[in-house]
Structure formats: structure tokens, C-alpha cells
Image: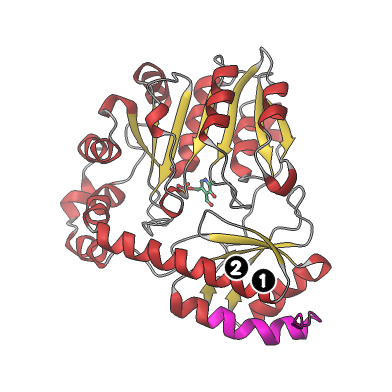
Amino acid sequence: MLSARTAVRSLKEYHPPLSGRTGLRLDFNENTQGASPRVLSRLRELTLEELARYPEREPVERRVAGYLGARPGETLLTNGVDEAIHLLCQTFLEAGDEAIVVVPTFAMYELLAASAGARVIAVPAARNFEFPTEEVVARITDRTRLIAVANPNNPTGTLAAREDLVRVARAAPQAAVFVDEAYFEFCGESMLSEVRELPNLFVARTFSKAYGLAGLRIGVLVGCERQMQMVRKVASPYNVNAVALACLPAAMDDQPYVNGYVAEVLRERLRLQRALDAWAIRYWPSRANFVLAHFGERGPLLVKALGRRGILVRDRSSDPGCAGCVRITVGNERQMDELLMALPETLHEIGIRKKVG
Ligand SMILES: Cc1ncc(COP(=O)(O)O)c(C=O)c1O
């Protein structure tokens, strides 16, 4: 009888709650208002001829490389950051190798590393979800072949310092050190400039978040040329579809739109954090387009009560160290008005009373 590989049989299934997402989408850290209108114009101009041809990735890849200040040989467009993680696992992990992740974090690292047969070493974040540099370094062994770090991290919004990531990369020259900058635009700090110094460092960016193209599936992986040659070998030549390749330049051309959206989200992030302060609700100051807040045992109730009002937020209670935590994506001003108007009666309904004074 046909049987899946042992590593696959023992994998946990990952089913993000995608169905029935109508209303205000503050649950997946997406762009909440949509991409630049130029993307829609480009979509409307698409021809059947463009869809009939296999997609050619290289011209857009060169453009993205130039935008990132990288060489084309250092740059690979991917089917979202998810594919970048998959490709790194396929390129560098043998069964029995070790992959280090700092938890809580984005679930795909563990899932894809385990599916390649690696043993996942989960290192808990330090106090206040800070990056536990010394603990990570202490867990590096000869078998460590992947260290994956979301920076800023999801779901905590915390940022690891450049020196700490450099220290980890230098301590594990035999491992691919993957820095996932999916939320870069909301934070502005990057490890890209270290890629030429550190031949085991890989940096990923996505167009799913600030750029509003999550549905098109396009991201980019950057690493030293020699290693990227290996990664390219395991990628399909058609990994990024023609629609995404046609639309990305239109999105990139409209930097004022992206910058305007990011600036608005940053203002609204501050407003949300202030509102949480006023309610004496604990949260972790975020460097991304979401805020993780602690509602204790009422967390799941809050998610349901906001859901009844058409506002979707994400219960993170089952993430390591996140009992009672809810992650709220930050949207534009109008959307956050809607949330902040609904919050008082929702908190009241679940039994959280406003702090006096
Ligand atoms: C840290 C992190 N990396 C990657 C992704 C997924 O990116 P993409 O849509 O490019 O696959 C997410 C999405 O939530 C994320 O939080």
C-alpha cells in the first residue's frame, strides 16, 4: 500500500481559518485596503496571449533585484515567502538535520522543516518575547542546517537586533540563516546589506503585506550568489505565475501609494496601542502591521464577540507562550475607527471594565 514519507505522516496539519472571511479583515496581517489601483488597471489589460505563454520570471526578477540593491544572481522571485522557506528546506535539509526556530513564530518554518525530515528545535523567546540570542547560539550543533527568524516576528511584532542576527549567522556557518522580512515596510530595518558578508544568510521579502498582493503570491529571496545557484536548482522555472509577474511592476511603480498606506498604518498602530493602554490591556509594542494583546481567559470570547460585529481578529492562544493573546492587524484610519468604536461595548460585553483614572 502506498504510504507517505514518515516525516509527512507525522506532520501536524495547518489550516488557517480562511473560510467566511467577510467584514473587517484584521486577522491575517494583510493589507486591509488593497493594492495600488494601478494593479487593477494592469489586470484589466491582461491579454489571453499573456496567459497562454509560460511566465518569464527573469525581467521582473532583475527589476526587483535593482530595487533591493541586489544582483540578479543573488535574487529569486518566489511564490510568496512560503515558497522561499520550502526551497531553503529542500536545498539544505537532510533527514535528521536540525532546524532552529524561536517560538512563538510563523508556523510554516516548523512545518516545512519537519516535512523535509529535519528535527525542529524550538527555542522559547526571552522575556517580553525578545530574541533569545544566547539560547539560540547554545542550541547550535554540527547538525544545525537551518535557523529561521521572522523579523519583525509574527505574532509578537518584536524585532531582533542586527548584531544578534549577525552573531547567530557567524556561530552557525554550516546552517542557512533565514531572516524573514515579510513586515519590513512597517519597520524599516533590514539585513539585506549583510548578505555579501555572510554567505549563509538569506533574506526574504513579500509583496503580500504592505503591497497588498497576498492573493497573487509573490515574494523574493536574496542570498549569496553561490548558494542561490543551489536554491534555483530546486525551484520550478514557472514558480511565479504570469498574472503576478504582470502586476508586480505596476505595484512597485506606485511607491507613493505603498508609502502612504504604511504611514497610515503606523499612525493607527500608535492609536491602537494607546487605546489598549487606556484599557490597561497588556500588549507588546509592535514593529509590524499588527499588535499582540493579552486578554487572558477572555481572549477567545473577544475574538467571537468582535466576529459577531463583523470584525475579524486572530486568537493566538495556542501559540507557545501566548495563552490569552489575540493578534489584531492594523488597518487604515477608517477601519481602525470601526474597531475602536466597537471595542468599548465588546469589552464590556465580555466583562472587561475600563480602568478608572
Ligand atoms: C513572518 C511571515 N512570513 C511569511 C508570511 C507569508 O508570506 P507570503 O504571503 O509571501 O507567503 C507571513 C504571513 O503571514 C508571515 O507572517
In the orientation shown, which residue stands out farthest toward the top? 142
Q: Which residue is tagged 2?
A: 273
Where residue 7 sits in the image (x, y, percent)?
A: 69, 29
Check the picture and name the quadrant holding the N terminus: top right
> Disc 1 residue type?
Asp
Residue under the image location 57 percent in, 56 percent down: 286
Q: Quadrant of residue 196?
A: top left
Return the residue nearer the eye: 345 or 244.
345
Q: Is residue 353 left or right of residue 165?
A: right
> Disc 2 residue type?
Gln
The residue stretch that appears in magenta: 338-357
Residue under the image location 46 percent in, 68 percent down: 267
Q: Main secondary structure of the magenta part?
A: helix
Return the residue nearer the eye: 282 or 16.
282
Q: Is residue 34 magenta?
A: no
Residue under the image location 65 percent in, 81 percent down: 343
Q: Is residue 107 left or right of residue 28?
A: right
Where residue 357 sits in the image (x, y, percent)?
A: 74, 82
18 lies above or below 235: below
| Residue 259 can be seen in this image | yes
Where residue 80 sits in the image (x, y, percent)?
A: 43, 45
Helix, strand or loop under label 1 = helix
Helix, strand or loop under label 2 = helix
